[in-house]
Image: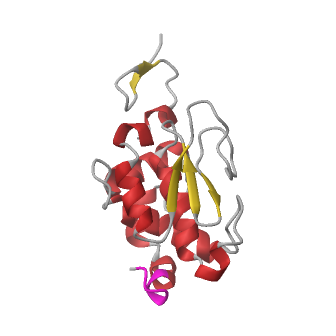
Amino acid sequence: MSHWVPDVAGTTTASGDPADAVLRVGGIGFDGPRALLARHGLMLVPVADGEAIPGSFWGDTEAGIIGTTVYARADTPVHSLLHEACHLIVLPAEKRALVHTDATDSIEEEDATCYLQIVLADQLPGVGSARLMEDMDRWGYTYRLGSTRAWFEQDASEARAFLRARGLL
């Protein structure tokens, strides 16, 4: 028997895969993310449905980054768009221009990226940090405390310190 999971576009999917229920950029539109990224000196470029996403590390629907540009399609998960954008935001400006597809230099930057994407989700109408953390869990982000929320609330002091030191919190 199929387990039907609603997606954000109002259609349904029979896969039963929790990742299918994550919020997609098409569900919130490009305007909010575009404005948010612009406040951090980044540009969001929409990619046509079915086209390969430039600079995507994981491929498929995952967002991509090249320099100060973030690429996404309507079916790109919001958490992916924010994650890739936050990789650029945590980098010093002089390093951003050199980025193509892979921006992570360290575990500290990766943790700071994860933390910041949750914080910035509250600045996107229709998203919010609670929904983003749920979607991160659905997608398969893993933390030693068992959930994104537990990590964010109880185990992310180094990520907060990293972001504070750079004036990002």
User: To which quarter of the image does residue 40 belong?
Assistant: bottom left
User: To which quarter of the image does residue 5 belong?
Assistant: top left
The location of residue 118, given as percent across then percent down, is 41, 62
- Is 133 included in the stretch rendered in magenta? no
Q: Residue furthest left?
A: 125
Which residue shows up at 58% across the image and 66% down it?
A: 68
The location of residue 1, given as percent across then percent down, is 47, 10
Q: Residue furthest top?
A: 1
Q: Would you say 57 lies left or right of 36 here?
A: right
- Between 10 and 66, the one nearer to me in the picture: 66
Is residue 44 visible in the rendered image? The answer is: yes
Q: Residue furthest bottom?
A: 165
The location of residue 29, given as percent across then percent down, is 37, 42
Range drawn in magenta: 163-168
Quadrant location of the C terminus in the rendered image = bottom left
Which residue shows up at 57% across the image and 41% down it?
A: 47
